[in-house]
Image: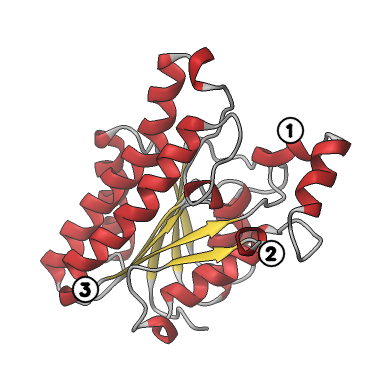
Amino acid sequence: MRLEGKVAIVTGAASGIGRAIAKVYGKEGAKVVVADVQEEPREGGKPTPKVIEEKGGEAIFVKTDVSLEEEVDELVEKAIEKFGVIDILVNNAGIFHQEKIHESDSENWKDLIDVNLNGTYLCTKKVINHMLEKGIEGNIINISSIAGSVGYAGSPAYCASKGAITNLTRELAVDYAGEGININSISPGVIKTEMTEQFRSDPDMKAFMEQNTPYKRLGEPEDIAYAAVFLASDESNFINGEDLLVDGGWTAK
């Protein structure tokens, strides 16, 4: 129960990595606000809040498009209305597409940046204002990617957004460490989610990804979730502005 008594917003938490984080946070005692554009998990199963409640936790769902400021405002207001405070924010919501830049569609680029980067900006801005107003020494965790540290073929918009998130994390830590707000990021490698299904379903691509992961397996959403528990807990109080690579050794090569 490392997060007992804490209130956490997790964006993109209906499915994949965000769902795993929300479930583990509930298990560790946090009250969880599940934010997503849809409530039903893309991989199937019961909605995330229902799973948390069945395990004895507390959770609510708030339909949220993180690229829209008015919906982010509503998300934060509903979290405070329900639970009183916000101690933890996990900026996980994100989208992915592949197209080389000379073939790219400008609207696709804009949409991806709006969700991945601007969504992180909007949620962080609103939650930090709340933390400063209430004197909360909270934790903000941004889900970046190894694609923010190395090139990933055919993915310029995704790489640009994740690289920006990683460095935004460092800058925010410098600005708010003095207020007792810890801001870190996690960079997953290839994780078995709906987002990566298009690659994992190709035997050659799956073999390539496994061969490039020294651990010789692809990651599970829970691998990221437990890293997110650590960064939200008191155990990581002196860690600020760091990007935690959870990639099975991909970037170590």
Could you give the CA–CA distance between mark 1 and mark 2, rounded to whole angstroms?
A: 20 Å
In the image shown, does 63 or 19 lie closer to the viewer?
A: 19
Mark 3 vs 1, N-terminal side: 3
**Percent x, y for residue 7?**
37, 68
**Percent x, y for residue 35?**
44, 47
Mark 1 element type: helix
The disc at residue 246 is none
The disc at residue 198 is 1
Please state which amino acid type lies under the numbered disc 3: Ala
Residues at badges 2 and 3 in contact (C-beta under 8 Å)? no
Please state which amino acid type lies under the numbered disc 2: Gly
Mark 2 vs 3, N-terminal side: 3
Please, is residue 59 above or below residue 116 in the view? below
Give the labeled residue for mark 3: 177
Q: Is residue 96 visible?
A: yes
**Percent x, y for residue 48?**
59, 53
Residue at image coords 85%, 46% = 207
Which corner quadrant holds the C terminus? bottom right
> Would residue 105 appear left or right of 134 to someone viewing this image?
right
In the rendered image, the residue lying farthest to the left is 133
Please state which amino acid type lies under the numbered disc 1: Gln
Residue at image coords 44%, 73% = 231
Please, is residue 190 above or below residue 135 in the view? above
